[in-house]
Every structure is written in C-alpha cells, then in structure tokens.
Image (cartoon, grey):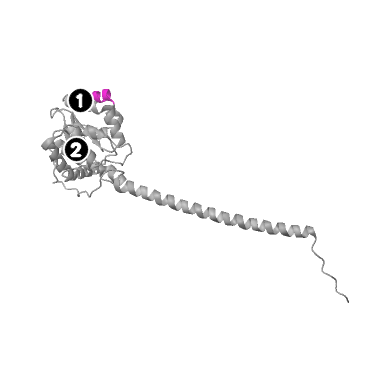
Amino acid sequence: MSSMAREKPSKSVREKAAAARAEQQAKEKRRERTVRIVGAIGVIVVVVAIIGIAVFASRSGSGGGGDVRPLPSPDPSAPVPAGVYDSSGEVPYGVPYGTAPATAPLLEIWEDFQCPACGSLEAINGAGIQSLAAEGKVRLVWRSTAFLDNKWGTTSSAEAIAAWGCAIDAGKTAEYHDIVYANQPTVEGDGYTQEQLLAFAEEVGISGVPLEEFNTCLTGGRYLGWAVNSTQAFYEGDIPGTPAGFLNGTRLDGAQLGDQAGLEKLVAEATQ
C-alpha cells in the first residue's frame, strides 16, 4: 500500500500561526515593560520616602536653622534675670514691665517667641499693651513658654527666652522682646540661631562691655534654666495655648488682647 504524501499547510494557516507568534511576542514585551515600569516606580517611591524622612529628621533635629543643645531639668533655684520674679514671686518666672503701682490691675500674658499667633498679636497691639503698662494703668507681666520646642524637637524657643534674659540684664527688656518678634521665622519651628540672637542685641543698642556680657550669658546658657522653669509653670497652669492673657486672673483670648479699645475698657473696669 503506497503511503500518501503529507500535505503542506495552506497559506492561511501559516499566516495565522505567524500572527499568533507575533501576538505572543508582543504580550511578552508588554509584560517586560510593565515589570520595568513598576520597578522604576517602586524605586522612585523609596527615594521620595527617604528624602521625606531626611527632611523631617532635619526639621525635627535642628528646627530648620535654630540651635539645639541639651536643656537642664526644672530647678526652682536656677538664676533669673534682673528684676524677674523667681520661683517664690507673685508671678513665678514672670517679667514685669511698666510703672504701674501695686494696686493696678495685673495683666499676665503667656507667649512663645515662635508662636505665629503671638507674633500677630505683637504686630497688632503689642505697642498698645506696652503703653498701658508704661502709663501705669496696668501691671504687665510677660510669661514665657517654650512649648513649641516639644512640637518641633528643637530648643529654639528656650534659646530665645534665655537670650531675652541676657538682654533684660542689659536693660533692654521691651526692646529685645520686640525685635525677636519682629524677626520671627516665617515657618513655625525654624527658630533662631545664636548668631541671630546676638545680632538682635547689637540692633537694640547693646554694645561694649554689656555686649560682651550678653554674649557670655547667651553662649553659656545662663538663663536656659529660667526658660525651662517658666515652661514648666505653663504646663502646670494648664494654659490652653498662646497667646493667653489673664487680667486679675480672668482669662483673655487673643482677640481681646488685640483690641486696644476693648482692652482699655476691661482694664478700667478692673481698676474700679
């Protein structure tokens, strides 16, 4: 029995087979391309995450420009600047300002040098509040806190408070207070460097031997303990935030402190 010759595939069959092979190759190429893209995206995500962590660590560790050094533990015996209430004073660790008699209403204002709302209050009515004290209408006592340092992991607010203490010793209480706020960082947490704090002293007119003493006081951290103690008093007093005012013990919010006419009325009522 003779064998039959095998028939060759038709042209249409060959074309279909070729098309199938081409489609399979295309699928494999698309899969390889997808794997490469996903891998690249993964690398980008990791890189972005690393950069984000680095930036966060930089902000948390250095305050974006402020100096960071270890702070002392609270100690009621730590030195305070000239004329500032000590731990046993009427307003512990407070900074009195003005010429008002002991019978005048007492206005306490809690503030943090890095607090944007405090900076706004200073710009809006800082001069008005100081004028009430300078005219003897109210006993103004500034009370400092460095609570924002805990938020940002810095010591910038404490350093600013300590520098202010050095300026108080040099007789520039209000002037230094005002210039620190006038140069408040635009980004909360960026803080102040020691170079800035020293430059502020020169700008308010501290020079010669007093400037040398200021520099020694600042770099030596003489009043960091005072800053820590005042901040501890802030926490113990359950103060809700800054700025916070108290007129003869009655709470005043930022809006009331910023309204000069309204504040004068409150002071007049408290005087009666």
Work out whether 70 lies above or below 174: below
Q: Where in the figure is residue 84, as x and y percent of width and height?
A: 14, 37
Q: Looking at this view, is 70 or 32 the one in front?
A: 32
Is 261 inside the magenta-drawn segment? yes
- Dots 2, 1 in contact, CB < 8 A: no
Work out whether 208 lies above or below 18: above
Q: Quadrant of residue 127?
A: top left
Q: Residues within 10 Å of mark 2 (few under 14, many from 20)?
A: many
In the rendered image, the quadrant that contains the C terminus is: top left
In the rendered image, the quadrant that contains the N terminus is: bottom right
Q: Is residue 45 left or right of residue 5?
A: left
Which dot, 2 or 1, sits closer to the camera?
2
Q: Is residue 225 left or right of residue 44?
A: left
Q: Amino acid at mark 2?
A: Trp
Residue 87 seen from this side: no
Q: Amino acid at mark 1?
A: Ser
Task: Give the residue pinned by disc 2.
Answer: 164
Which is the main secondary structure of the residues drawn in magenta? Answer: helix
Range of the magenta residues? 259-265
Question: Which SS class for mark 1?
Answer: helix
Task: Give the residue pinned by disc 1.
Answer: 131
